[in-house]
């Protein structure tokens, strides 16, 4: 079921308190992120505090999109934009931004990593952070 549908159902159910609906939505998002292309922290050596990560079922997961190939070398723009996207206070939200199609970019920001379009990624993140859309 699509995440938007789940959110709509959770918020429209009179018996569901707003907090319960928000918790359901957050849990669903984390399950989807953790169920995707991620590496558990146990498999990643030399953990860097700039890595984007999400917690699910007491395990820290690092989405693979942020790494260049199998070397697990993080794209510098990920660390650069982390604070702008609020990765420290809302890591799942920051990961979701990278993995959600951006209408201005006509692509998911994660799909543009390592390309000549990284300046556009910076611009899109800045627009979001400063509510300029």
Image: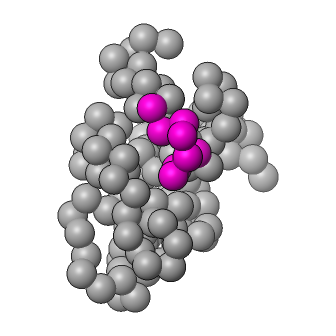
Q: Is residue 6 visible?
A: no
Relative placement, left or right, of 65 versus 40 is right
Q: Is residue 118 above or below residue 51?
A: above
Q: Judge by depth and name the residue closer to the eye, 30 or 129.
A: 129
Magenta stretch bounds: 112-119
Identify the colour scheme used: one colour
Residue 129, image x and y in percent? 35, 24
Magenta span main SS: loop
In magenta stretch: residue 113: yes
Q: From the viewer's perspective, is residue 18 above or below residue 128?
A: below
Q: Residue at x 61, y 49 (%)?
A: 111
Q: Is residue 126 left or right of residue 25?
A: left
Location of residue 71 (image quadrant): bottom left
Q: Position of residue 78 (x, y in %)?
A: 37, 50
Q: Tell which of 53 and 22 is nearer to you.
A: 53
- Quarter of the image for residue 50 reads bottom left
Q: Which quarter of the picture shows residue 19?
A: top left
Q: Is any atom of residue 56 visible in this view? A: yes
- Please determine whether, in this image, residue 56 is positioned above or below residue 25: below
On screen, residue 133 versus residue 50, left or right, reads right
Where in the figure is residue 31, as x and y percent of width and height? 56, 64
Residue displayed at 28% across by 44% down: 80
Tell whether position 47 is magenta.
no
Residue lying furthest top: 132
Task: Identify the residue shown where x is 37% and y is 24%.
Answer: 126
């Amino acid at each position: 079921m699509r995440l938007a549908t789940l959110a709509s159902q959770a918020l429209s159910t009179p018996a569901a308190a707003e907090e319960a609906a928000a918790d359901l939505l957050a849990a669903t998002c984390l399950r989807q992120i953790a169920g995707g292309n991620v590496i558990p922290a146990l498999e990643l050596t030399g953990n860097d505090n700039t890595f984007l990560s999400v917690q699910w079922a007491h395990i820290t997961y690092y989405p693979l999109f942020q790494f260049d190939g199998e070397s697990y070398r993080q794209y510098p723009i990920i660390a650069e934009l982390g604070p702008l996207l609020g990765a420290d206070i809302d890591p799942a939200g920051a990961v979701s931004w990278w993995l959600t199609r951006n209408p201005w970019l006509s692509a998911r920001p994660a799909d543009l990593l390592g390309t000549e379009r990284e300046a556009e990624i910076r611009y899109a993140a800045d627009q979001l952070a400063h509510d300029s859309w």
